[in-house]
């Protein structure tokens, strides 16, 4: 790979971070990861009767302790409720509260549809290639993180 092209790619990744910073401002106490959990719980609840913590963890490819922490934060914000299922009290299931459904509607459904309209001039194939490239670069850099630490003095 060409070094100049690598530099340009990394500069563009910095721009991509700025894109994320331009997303809608979230209510106090909320993080972008919370919106991902809300979206996931909503999506899974459309397919399954019960949404378990492990379902969210698997879907987002996040460890159980990390997802449990996020879910507990959302529960304290009255966005998600945790219950046990009637036939097995050991299994914890998740449901969005009315506030959680409202946040889904605003921060996922309406906002993502609006953004899709704004991106109308971007070719879908270009977006797919961008997604694949960033994902692949992330996996490469993550898998070589230890090796790259040799550059630190």
Image (spheres, rainbow, N blue to C red):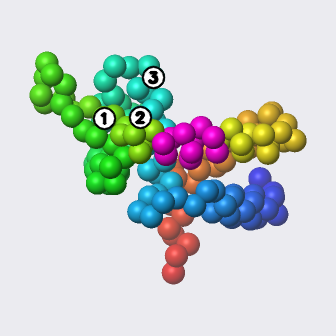
Residue at x 38% of width, y 20% of height? 48
Residue at x 33% of width, y 34% of height? 95
Magenta stretch prevailing secondary structure: helix
Q: Is residue 140 visible?
A: no
Q: Name the disc covering residue 46, or none.
A: 3
* Residue in front for this viewpoint, 141 or 93: 93
- Please give the residue where the numbered disc 1 appears in the rendered image: 94
Q: Position of residue 146 (x, y in %)?
A: 46, 60
Q: Which residues are magenta?
A: 102-111
* Residue in front for this viewpoint, 25 or 102: 102
> Measured along the vertical axis of the image, is residue 39 above or below residue 13?
above
Q: CA distance from mark 3 to mark 1?
A: 13 Å
Marks counted in the figure total 3
Q: Name the disc covering residue 14, or none.
A: none
* Residue in front for this viewpoint, 65 or 91: 91
Badge 1 marks a residue whose secondary structure is strand
Badge 2 marks a residue whose secondary structure is helix
Q: Quick check: marks 3 and 1 in contact, CB under 8 Å?
A: no
Q: Quick check: marks 1 and 2 in contact, CB under 8 Å?
A: yes
Q: Name the disc covering residue 41, or none.
A: 2
* Residue in front for this viewpoint, 3 or 115: 115
Q: CA distance from mark 3 to mark 2?
A: 9 Å
Q: Position of residue 77 (x, y in %)?
A: 34, 54
- Quarter location, residue 133: top right
């Amino acid at each position: 790979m060409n070094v100049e092209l690598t530099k340009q790619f990394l500069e563009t990744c910095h721009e991509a971070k700025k894109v994320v910073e331009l997303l809608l401002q979230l209510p106090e106490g909320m993080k972008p990861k919370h919106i991902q959990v809300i979206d996931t719980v909503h999506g899974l609840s459309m397919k399954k009767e019960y949404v378990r913590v492990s379902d969210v963890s698997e879907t987002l490819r996040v460890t159980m302790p990390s997802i449990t922490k996020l879910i507990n934060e959302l529960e304290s914000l009255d966005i998600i409720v945790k219950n046990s299922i009637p036939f097995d009290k050991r299994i914890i299931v998740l449901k969005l509260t009315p506030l959680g459904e409202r946040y889904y509607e605003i921060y996922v459904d309406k906002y993502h549809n609006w953004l899709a309209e704004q991106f109308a001039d971007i070719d879908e194939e270009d977006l797919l290639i961008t997604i694949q490239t960033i994902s692949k670069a992330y996996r490469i850099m993550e898998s070589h993180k230890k090796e790259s630490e040799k550059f630190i003095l």
